[in-house]
Image (cartoon, coloured by chain):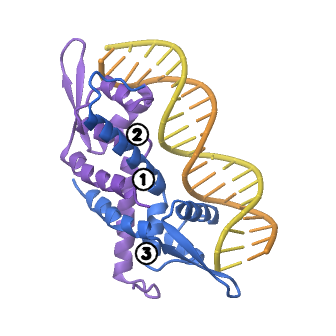
Chain colours: A purple, B blue, C orange, D yellow
Amino acid sequence: MIKETSSNALNKAFLLKSCRINTALDTISGRWKALILIHISEETNRFSLLKSALGGISDQTLGKCLKELERDGLLWKEIIAEVPVRVDYHLSEKGKALLPILVSLSEWSDMK
Amino acid sequence: MIKETSSNALNKAFLLKSCRINTALDTISGRWKALILIHISEETNRFSLLKSALGGISDQTLGKCLKELERDGLLWKEIIAEVPVRVDYHLSEKGKALLPILVSLSEWSDMK
DNA sequence: CAGAATCCCTTGGGATACTG
DNA sequence: CAGTATCCCAAGGGATTCTG
């Protein structure tokens, strides 16, 4: 198919694409992030609910994951001024757009 | 410890699905594996070619990645008894099936 | 309740050197 | 050419403790 003797445009396009793939994988890889996104999409969207739903994650790690997912634009925080304070997490459009891809991945992982 | 006041079927399905997603992510995450798969799909399928195409990977890490990808059924080795010995790597059906998902991921990572 | 601070351990991946 | 063997370091993630 594509030859490599000449570093053609297609090859470069693939290199570029692979870069983006790594960016994407960095964003969602790790032991918890995909699970967190799925739970939030299911309305399990508060710190303590997430913690018990995920089963085994530490406060530390959950906090860090949420912060990174927020920084990467996959979710946003809604801070509700009750007493005690309450925080709801919601998926952004980008976060929602990732869900079907996660479903594809889970289906793919069933392949023999 | 499974509890949740109403542990409904949907929740369990999602937990199961998220497990598979983590399996899938474990298989392809890391700094190199997705890139390796893409290069092999482009006929860059020998050890030394991969090494120079990837730019910066160590022998050690390339060897380990290839071994794990083979163990996970994404590729297979064709050993050609020339002198010096030659090895071609090829994607399995499962490996090929992953490519469109990687493309989706790279497109997704372009989202604002 | 929703986190932050600190400490520690495991693991991915690089550097270097060597083999069939 | 196609790897393997050792060694080492940075980063992810857990445990514990503390705060607004």
The residue labelled by disc 1 is: B24
> Picture coordinates of residue B72 (x, y %)?
52, 59
Select label 1 or label 2 by which is in front.
1
Q: What secondary structure is marked by label 1? A: helix
Q: Are marks 2 and 3 in contact (CB under 8 Å)?
A: no
Query: Which one is in front, A67 or B88?
Result: B88
> Picture coordinates of residue B29 (x, y %)?
45, 54
Q: What secondary structure is marked by label 2? A: loop
The amino acid type found where label 1 is placed reads Ala
Distance CA(mark 1)–CA(mark 3): 19 Å
Q: Residue at x 23, y 39 (%)?
A: A41
Sequence-wise, the earlier of marks 1 and 3 is 1
> Picture coordinates of residue A78 (x, y %)?
19, 29
Distance CA(mark 1)–CA(mark 2): 13 Å
Label 1 resides on the chain identified as B
For label 1, the crowd category at 10 Å Cα-Cα, with few meaning under 14, some 14 to 19 and many 20 or more, is many
The residue labelled by disc 2 is: A32
Left/right placement of residue A12 relative to residue A74 reads right
Q: Residue at x 36, y 42 (%)?
A: B16
Residue A96 in sight here: yes
The amino acid type found where label 3 is placed reads Ser
The amino acid type found where label 2 is placed reads Trp
The residue labelled by disc 3 is: B41
